[in-house]
Amino acid sequence: MVSLKKTNDKGVWELETDKKEYRSRLDIIAAILRASMGGATKTRLMYTAYLSYKQRELYVSWMEDKKLLERTHNVYMLSKSGQEFLNTYEKLTKQLDNLIPRDKDAKTGSSGRAARRLKRNEQSDASSTTGSELR
C-alpha cells in the first residue's frame, strides 16, 4: 500500500510505503558485536540486536567459529578480532555515509524497524525517568 503523509505544517508531503527495510548481514554482525561488548548471554544478544531465535543461532555460532566472539560460562564477550572487525565496519560505514547518505541508526546499524523500535524504547525510558507519574 502506498499513501501520502504530511511531514510538517509547511505543506511538505512524503510518499509512504509498506515496504520492509532489511538489515544487511554486516549490519546484523555489527549489532551483535556491539551487544556483546560488556558481556551478554544468548538471550541478551537476541533482544539487544533484535534477532530471531534462528538468526541468533546462525550468527552467534558463525561468529564463534570466526573468533569474533568468545564464550565463557554462557556469556559472550567481544574478542580482539571482533573489536577490530567492528572498528573497521564503523569506519567504512562512516565513509560511505559521507558519500551516500542514508537513514541509519548508529546504535543498531540499521535503517529500519530495529532502529525505530530502539528510538521508541529510548523515548519511553526518558519519559518514565523524567516524571514521577505512573503510566
Image (spheres, grey):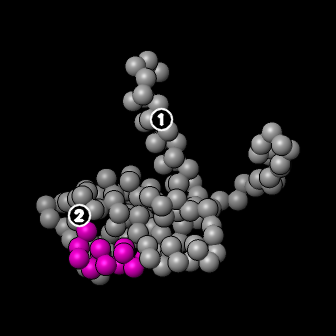
Q: Is residue 89 above or below residue 42?
A: below
Residue beneath label 2, please? 76
Residue 90 falls inside the magenta stretch: no
Asked whether the viewer can see residue 42, the reply is: yes
- Report the magenta residues as a range: 78-89
Vertical position of residue 81 compared to residue 135: above or below: below
**Which of the pair 132/115 is nearer the observer?**
132
**Residue at image mark 1:** 124
> Amino acid type of disc 1?
Ser
Q: Residues within 10 Å of mark 1 (few under 14, many from 20)?
A: few
For disc 2, the neighbor class at 10 Å (few under 14, some 14 to 19, many from 20) is many
Q: Report the amino acid beneath label 2.
A: Tyr
Residue 39 lies in quadrant: bottom left
Residue closer to the observer: 126 or 36: 126
Could you tell me which residue is drawn at 51 percent across and 46 percent down? 119
First in residue order: circle 2 vs circle 1: 2
Assess whether residue 85 is covered by the magenta stretch: yes
Determine which quarter of the picture holds residue 35: bottom left
Give the answer, above or below, for where 103 lies relative to 8.
below
